[in-house]
Structures are given as C-alpha cells and as structure tokens.
C-alpha cells in the first residue's frame, strides 16, 4: 500500500512538473530555445535569433499569452544538437523549435508537435574536391554534428558500405562546416536544407555545392516535454490554424522562396510533397 501511495504521489509530482502552461503563468516568463546556425530555421542575425522556426515559436508564445490571459517575458536560450533534449527535460527551456528531427527514439524522452518540414541527409563539399556521392568518400575525413540523427545515418552507411570514412564531429553546424572550409574534412553530412543555408551564408558561396543521394527522409518538429497534453494541444492547434489559414505557406515562402538575411540569398526551395501533404494531414508521425 505504501508503495502504491508513493507511486501515485510521484506521478502527481511528475504531472505537475510537466504543466508548462502553469509553469509559465506562475513565473511570468517563457524560455524558448534557438539555434545559432540552423539557417533558415533558427540562426543569429547579429545578436538576434531569426528564421522560420523562430516565427513558429512567436506564434506559440502569442497563443500561450492568450491562453493564460497575460503578457509574459520571453527569454531566448541558445541550444546545440547535444544539449537541446536535456535542457527541455530539466525545465531550462519550455519549447524547442529549431531543426530537430522527430523520430521514435527521441519520442521516448520528449513529445513532438505537428511536423513542419521534411529533409534528408546529403553532403556539402568544395566544388574543387570533385566529390559527387558517398562512394567518393572512401578513406576520407567527413564531418557531421554531435547529437544529430545524421551521425547515426552516416556511421551505419559507412559500416554497411565499408567506406572506412573517418567521421569527425563539430559541436554545431557552423563548426562542422568550418571543418570543410578549412580542408580538415572533405565533406559535411547533414540535412540538405541546413547545408543549403550554410552555403548561402558562406564567405564564398560559389566554392561549395550540395551533392549525394538523400539517405532518408525525416520530419522536423518542435519539441515539448513529455506528458503535458494541454501544452501539446495548444502548440498543435496553433500550427493547425496557421496551416488552415494559409499563413504557414506564406511563412514558408518568406524563408525558402525569397531573399533572407544576412546576405539576401534566396534558397529557392519549393515546398516538398511530404510537407504539402502534411498541411492537410497535420500529422506528428515520427521517422522510424
């Protein structure tokens, strides 16, 4: 009986700790995550985080304030691929909308909102390298970013195809790209959209190209804490309203089909079929 009572109390404490709306209402602040170099989703334009995911975050903040009936202070917390999940779990941040893949493994630790993008692992290389696909990487040094699904994909591909690649890790995407820029790696394997963004903002964009087959298609989604159905519903309803009204597509066109800061480059990336289909399905289905 004592054990059952303890279990019930622990469950109640856990449920209370994961009540994000109450946490925000009580503290008067909402802490949202941003990435420093996930162009065009979440990145720094000088000292200010901007991007497609930042605009999604702003819409969620607006919905939270309407729900709790008061204006809150919004604090921005930089995160990396490696620390974004722990910082969400321990309550440091309340929402992470960046460039995070929604997959089943991460779904054991966090909850994901409706998918808002689809991408796959490819390679950025210097044009002078003559590398066109994964077979050209045999015995060479290849970069990726710590804590990403791309590392798992590249390691698996490397092993299965006996390429003997030497995989080196950057702490964030800008660090990984720098390894290629400085010729310390011949390629950087990452989500293709992030590679296009990095090239667009490179010192000499014409020196680089994105090559290789897409190894898999994965959805991006915003991360929330586990076992918080009220906050999950609010975030999902916010995205559903954006998708139904056409506002989501306008936001997409702003960041993927128009010139973006800081250099006014246009990624010119039409919406993928998977994303267009999800504007109707509004699914939070993870990658496997």
Image (tube, rainbow, N blue to C red):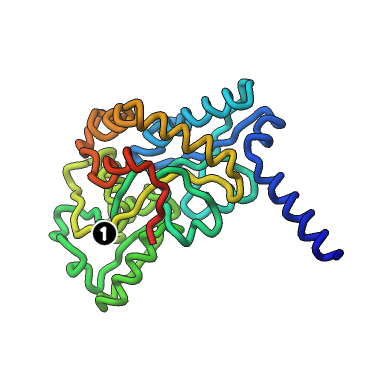
Q: Residue at x 53, y 38 (%)?
A: 233
- List x then y, in percent, for residue 12: 74, 50
Q: Nearer the viewer, residue 184 or 137?
A: 137
**Split into 4 quadrants, where in the image is the N terminus?**
bottom right
Q: Which residue is mark 1?
A: 187
Snapshot quadrant of residue 24: top right
Decide: is 189 above or below 113. Answer: below
Side of 100 relative to 91 (left or right) = left
Q: Nearer the viewer, residue 91 or 284?
A: 284
Camera-side residue of 201 and 118: 118
Q: Position of residue 176 (x, y in %)?
A: 36, 54
Question: Can residue 130 be seen in this snapshot?
Answer: yes
Name the spot of residue 98 as percent of width and height, x first.
43, 42
Question: Which image quadrant is residue 262 in?
Answer: top left
Relative to 241, is 198 on the left or the right?
left
The extreme right residue here reads: 2
Horizontal arrangement in the rendering, residue 21 relative to residue 131 (left or right): right
Q: Position of residue 212 (x, y in %)?
A: 19, 59
Q: Is residue 89 above or below residue 36?
A: below
Query: Seen in the image, is 87 located left or right of residue 275?
Result: right
Find the residue positioned furthest to the front. 1
Identify whether 7 is placed above or below 78: below
Q: How many marks?
A: 1
Residue drawn at 34 percent across, 54 percent down: 218
Of residues 175 and 134, the one nearer the viewer is 134
Which of the image's four quarters has the C terminus? Answer: bottom left
Callout 1: helix, strand or loop?
A: strand
Question: Residue placed at 20% from the left, 48% from the top?
Answer: 208
């Amino acid at each position: 009986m004592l054990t059952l009572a303890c279990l019930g109390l622990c469950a109640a404490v856990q449920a209370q700790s994961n009540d994000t709306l109450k946490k925000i209402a009580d503290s008067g602040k909402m802490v949202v995550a941003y990435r420093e170099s996930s162009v065009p989703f979440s990145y720094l334009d000088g000292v200010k985080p901007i991007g497609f995911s930042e605009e999604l975050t702003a819409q969620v903040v607006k919905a939270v304030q309407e729900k709790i009936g008061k204006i809150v202070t919004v604090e921005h917390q930089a995160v990396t691929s490696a620390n974004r999940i722990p910082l969400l779990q321990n309550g440091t941040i309340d929402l992470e909308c960046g460039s995070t893949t929604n997959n089943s493994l991460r779904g054991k630790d966090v909850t994901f909102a409706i998918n808002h993008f689809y991408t796959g692992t490819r390679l950025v290389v210097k044009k002078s390298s003559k590398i066109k696909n994964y077979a050209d990487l045999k015995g060479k040094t290849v970069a990726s970013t710590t804590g990403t699904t791309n590392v798992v994909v590249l390691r698996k591909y490397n092993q299965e195809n006996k390429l003997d690649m030497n995989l080196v890790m950057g702490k964030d995407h800008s660090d990984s790209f720098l390894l290629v820029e400085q010729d310390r790696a011949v390629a950087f394997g990452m989500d293709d959209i992030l590679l296009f963004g990095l090239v667009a903002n490179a010192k000499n964009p014409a020196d680089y190209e994105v090559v290789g087959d897409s190894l898999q298609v994965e959805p991006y989604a915003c991360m929330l804490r586990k076992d918080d159905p009220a906050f999950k519903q609010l975030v999902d309803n916010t995205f559903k309203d954006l998708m139904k009204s056409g506002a989501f597509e306008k936001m997409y066109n702003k960041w993927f089909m128009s010139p973006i800061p800081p250099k006014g480059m246009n990624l010119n990336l039409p919406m993928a079929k998977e994303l267009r289909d999800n504007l109707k399905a509004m699914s939070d289905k993870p990658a496997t």
